[in-house]
Image: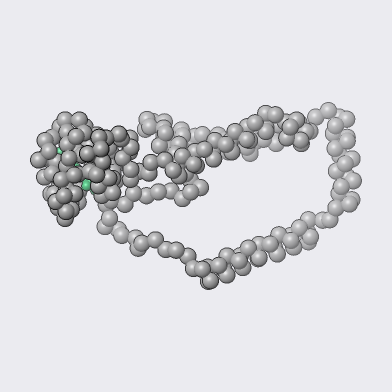
Amino acid sequence: MKPADKQAYLEEYELLKKKGKPFFPYAVMKDSAMMLLVAAVIIAMSIVLGAEQGPKADPTSTTYVPRPEWYFFFLFELLRVIKPPELVPIATIGIPTICMVLLLLLPFYDRGPERNPIRRPIATTAGVMTIVAMAYLTFLGATGGSPTEIEMEVAPRYEAGKEIVAGAGCLACHKIGENGGTIGPELTHIAQLVPRAAIVRSVEIGPDIMPSYRDLPPKKLNELADFLSSLD
Ligand code: HEC
C-alpha cells in the first residue's frame, strides 16, 4: 500500500469510527435478537410441521447405498470423477485444504487497498470461479447417476434386467460399468467368466456374504439373468 493511500484510509477510518456505534452493545444486541428469532422460527416449524423421518435404520441391510447431504454433493462428485485410488486423498482432502489455506492467508498476500470488485480482477475471478465450480459439481452430484444406477448403454431387451439389478442393491458390493462397490467381484464382464446358469445359481444361493435373492419373482430373476449374461 502506498503511504498516501494508507493515510487516506486511516483518516476515513477515524471519521467513520467517530460517527459509528460501538460493537458492544449495539451489534451484539442485534445479533442476539436475530439469533433468537431464527431459533424460535425453527422450533415453531418443528412443532407445527414436524420433520420427515426416513425409514428406521436397519443394521442388517447389506444393500443400503449411502448418499451424502446436498452440501457435500460437490465433494461426492469430485470423488466420482477422480477414479484412480491414489488420487482420491488429493481430491477429497488436498484440494479443499489448499483452497481453505489460501483463503485464510488472503489478508497476508493480498495487501492492495482496493475494495471495488471490478478493480480486483484476480480476486474476483478466483472467487467467481470457485462459486461456479462448486455449483456445477453440486448440480452434477445431485442429478448425475446415483450409485444405485447403472450407467451403461444396453439393448432395449436388457433394460428391465438392468433396472432390477440397479434396484436390488447389487451395486453396494459389485461394480458394474462406472458405479458400484468392491466388496464382491466386478460384474462388468461377468458373461465372459461364467455361464448364465452359474449367474442364476449365485444370485439364488448368495455365496459367502452375498445375500440370497431366491425370493425374487421368477420373471424378474430371468430378466436379471438376461441382463447379466449379456455383459461381455
Ligand atoms: C453384500 C454384498 C453383495 C451383494 C449385495 C450382492 N453380492 Fe453378489 N457377490 C458378493 C460376493 C462377496 C461374491 C463372491 C462370493 C464368493 O466368491 O464366494 C458375489 C458373487 C456374485 C456372483 C458370482 C460371480 C462370479 O464370478 O462367479 C454373481 C453373479 C453375483 N454375485 C451377482 C449379484 C447380483 C445380481 C446381486 C444383486 C441382485 C448381488 N450379487 C448382490 C457380494 C454381494
Residue 37 screen position, x and y as percent: 66, 65
Q: In which quarter of the image is residue 227?
A: top left
Residue 6 screen position, x and y as percent: 85, 34
- Is 48 placed left or right of 177 in the picture? right
Furthest residue to the front?
156
In front here: 110 or 44? 44
Q: In which quarter of the image is ligand 1?
A: top left
- Is 209 placed left or right of 107 in the picture? left
**Does residue 109 sit above or below 211 in this rendering?**
above
**Does residue 126 sit above or below 218 in this rendering?**
above
In front here: 70 or 29? 70
Question: Can the viewer see residue 75?
Answer: no
Residue at 85%, 32% (x, y): give it: 5
Residue 154 screen position, x and y as percent: 27, 35
- Is 73 placed left or right of 148 in the picture? right
**Does residue 22 sit above or below 225 in this rendering?**
below
Question: Can the viewer see residue 211?
Answer: yes
Furthest residue to the bottom?
47
Residue 39 screen position, x and y as percent: 61, 65
Residue at 54%, 40% (x, y): give it: 135
Total marks in image: 0
Q: Quadrant of residue 185?
A: top left
Residue at 89%, 40% (x, y): give it: 11
